[in-house]
Image (tube, grey):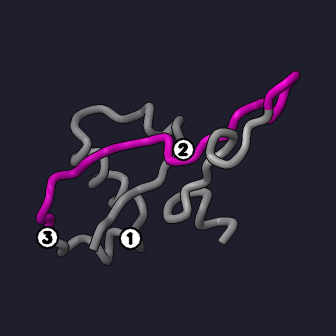
Amino acid sequence: MSVGAVCFPEYLKTRSGDNEAFLMQTLRDTPSVWARMEQAERIAPVHATGNYSYTCTRMHGPGWVMAGDAFAFIDPVFSSGVYPA
């Protein structure tokens, strides 16, 4: 099983220390999640990444148009992609 946290950028900016400590504290901060994860055993290192979703402010201009992923990408698995689904 893979476990992760999708967070607001403002929350991520509060991070101090390493990614593992930040993830564990984030899990602890939600009691219902921590109740399920407390006894879990990590078998791989913690990784962090961002920018799974994006949109551009302009879709077209004189002589050009953005289409598909050039204009917007909503991740189908995490974050905003799950909400529309």
Residue 85 lies in quadrant: bottom right
Does the residue at mark 2 contact the one at mark 1 (Cβ under 8 Å)?
no
Residue furthest to the front in view is: 63
Question: Residue placed at 32% from the left, 75% from the top?
Answer: 35
When the figure is inspected, residue 21 is found, relative to residue 28, above or below; the finding is above
In what quadrant of the picture does the N terminus appear?
A: bottom left
Residue 50 lies in quadrant: top left
In the image, 72 versus 32, the foreground residue is 72
Residue bearing the label numbered 2: 8
In the image, 84 versus 26, the foreground residue is 84
Question: Residue placed at 68% from the left, 48% from the top?
Answer: 68
- SS state under label 2: loop
Magenta residue check for 57:
yes
Q: Earlier in the sequence, mark 1 or mark 3?
A: 1
> Residue type at mark 3?
Glu
> Residue type at mark 2?
Phe
Spatial separation of the CA atoms under disc 1 and disc 3:
15 Å
Question: Residue placed at 84% from the left, 25% from the top?
Answer: 63
Q: Please state the extent of the stretch shown in magenta in the rendering.
A: 42-64
**Of helix, strand and loop, which mostly describes the magenta segment?**
loop
Q: Earlier in the sequence, mark 2 or mark 1?
A: 2
Q: Residues within 10 Å of mark 3 (few under 14, many from 20)?
A: few
Question: Residue placed at 54% from the left, 44% from the top?
Answer: 8
Spatial separation of the CA atoms under disc 3 and disc 2:
26 Å
Residue bearing the label numbered 3: 41
Q: Which mark is residue 33?
A: 1
Q: Nearer the viewer, mark 2 or mark 1?
A: 2
